[in-house]
Image (cartoon, rainbow, N blue to C red):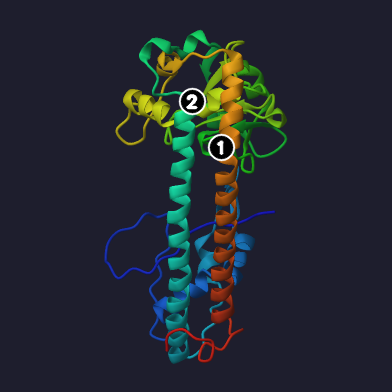
Amino acid sequence: MKTWQGSLAVSDHEGIVSPAYFVCSLSPNVHSRFAHYLLRSELYVSFYGALSKGIRPNQWDLPFDEFRSLPMLLPPIDEQRRIADFLDTETRRIDEVRAARQRIVGLMVLKRDRVIDGLVGGGQSVDRFVPLKYLVSSVSVGIVITPAAWYVPTEGVPALRGMNVRPGRIDASDLIQISHEGHLLHRKSRLHAGDLVVVRTGQAGAAAVVPPELDGVNCIDLVIVRPGAALVSKFAEYLLNSSYAKRRVSEFSVGSIQAHFNVAAMKAMPVPRYSVCEQERIVSDIEKAVEPIEQSVSRMREQDRLLVERRQALITAAVTGQIDVTTAGGGG
């Protein structure tokens, strides 16, 4: 199923914009804030998805001629203004609730991170640290030379990119594919279950264990850490996502626009040395300690998702006349 994603905004500033954006000058019978809500409604987002064309894997383009030919649902200008006022008030209330919840989630995530930091031992005396390279089988990197040359739309081999990797999690919902020829030529970047993939560019240092269902896929511009017999994958994941490891990554990242972390720096990173039994115990302790925190965070995020749906449904109902804004509350 094809989906469309984009952004719309009302601006009262003059200037120059990228050709990737459409600029609309509204006629006198169109209220700008009403048009802003109308064009962001579920109805119009569905139009964009139906009219968009694929330009590369997982990326879509909405042709300008198709966009400007869309019909506009325009009630009288005074009604447009009332609808916009109503939506300004109601969406602001929802946004304020979401912002408060997001602050709470941020504090809960911070608490979780501090619990993990305390248990992985990043604050130990330095004599217990060894370079990571002594605890792993290998540290390598995914495809970095013209990876796009190997992209195919279908029937290829899935490949992870930095955008798929979050601390402790791999999002496999939007994987690109490379040709079987490219996969064969890049054997060193094939992933095995239990490997760790670490982001090199952007959110440098974010690490996650490769799950069994992604065994054999390829990867692009990621550091690949293959644990040896002395390193437990899950312990390494917690360690590499800890504040201690983030500081080390920040110290050795390069690039003025986006942080960039390389293989040599990963190999040289000092890490606390524990026996396998100690690592497994620490992983168990971490999971017990963070489980209630993660459950609370998950509930809060689900509630936020419902608020987003509520906000979008409200906009659609108001601009399409499904609710009478004069009796539904909000501003007048």
- Secondary structure found at label 1: helix
Q: Nearer the viewer, residue 4 or 52?
A: 4
Report how far apart the C-alphas of labels 1 and 2 lie in the structure: 13 Å
Front of the two marks 1 and 2: 1
Q: Which residue is mark 1?
A: 289
**203 horizontally vs 300: left or right:** left
Point out residue 291 in the picture as x, y percentages from the top left corner: 60, 41
The percent position of residue 308, horizontal first and vertical second, equals 55, 64
Q: Residue at x 53, y 11 (%)?
A: 135
Q: Is residue 158 above or below residue 300?
A: above
Q: Name the one closer to the observer, 84 or 18.
A: 84
Residue 248 location (% of width, % of height): 37, 24
Q: Is residue 122 left or right of residue 283?
A: left
154 above or below 67? Answer: above
Question: Circle 2 sits on which residue?
Answer: 120
Q: Label 2 crowding class (10 Å Cα cut-off): few <14, some 14-19, many 20+?
A: many
How far from the left and from the top, in percent, is residue 241? 48, 31
Tell me which amino acid carries mark 2. Answer: Val
Mark closest to the chain's N terminus, 1 or 2 = 2
Q: Is residue 201 left or right of residue 283?
A: left
Q: Amino acid at mark 1?
A: Ala
The image quarter containing residue 155 is top right
Along the line of sight, the residue nearer the viewer: 11 or 55 = 11
* Number of callouts: 2
Give above or below for 83 relative to 285: below
Query: Helix or strand or loop: what does disc 2 sit on?
Result: helix
